[in-house]
Amino acid sequence: MAGLSALFACIPIIHLTLGLFMVFAPETFHNRGGNAPPAFLGWFLVIFAAMFILIGWTFAAFIFTTGRFLAKRKHYMFCLVMGGIECLFMPFGTVLGVFTIILLIQEPVKQLFNSPNTGTNVT
């Protein structure tokens, strides 16, 4: 899921590239003597595309980290919160988040997270 999230976070690279062209090479948008788009439009695309890419890659890193924490049975609250946040991203995130929450609210699983020898038999 982390890989898919990181991949989908790369989609705004198209907008980032378009915005950079609007800022640094506006002559590429001249159309039969028409005016080039204003530079602020290019900066708008660059800023928002970069923001979405950064947020998406950060979210993918958090999903990857959550998977590692689940395998080591550490940081129970972080895993539970990330399960809730993953529910917002349909359809795969919703499935993953719901099953993560269902698993984590069970009492035997809570005890695994609280036991002192967590992660000793996990490779």
Image (cartoon, rainbow, N blue to C red):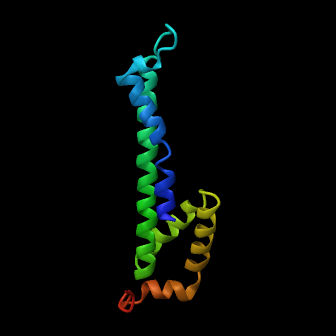
Question: Where in the figure is residue 67, as x and y percent of width and height?
Answer: 45, 73
Nearer to us in this view, 118 or 5: 5
What residue is at 50 percent from the left and 57 percent from the top?
Answer: 5
Q: How many numbered markers are drawn?
A: 0
Residue 50, given in percent of the width and then of the height, sits at: 41, 40
Which residue is pictured at 45% across the width and 77% down the height? 70
Kindly identify the residue that appears in the image at 51 percent across and 9 percent down.
34
Residue 108, image x and y in percent? 54, 89
Write down the quadrant of residue 39 in the picture: top left
Which quadrant holds residue 83?
A: bottom right
Q: Find the residue positioned furthest to the front.
A: 32
Q: Is residue 114 left or right of residue 103?
A: left
Above or below residue 114? Residue 61 is above
Q: In this rendering, is residue 5 above or below 42? A: below
Q: Quadrant of the C terminus?
A: bottom left
Q: Nearer the viewer, residue 21 or 28?
A: 28
For this view, does 107 lie left or right of residue 19?
right
Outermost residue toward the top?
Answer: 33
Q: Position of residue 8 (x, y in %)?
A: 51, 52
Image quadrant assignment for residue 23: top left
In the displayed structure image, the side of residue 99 where residue 22 appears, left or right: left
| Residue 100 to residue 20: above or below | below
Q: Which residue does the image show at 41% across and 74% down from the upper left?
A: 68
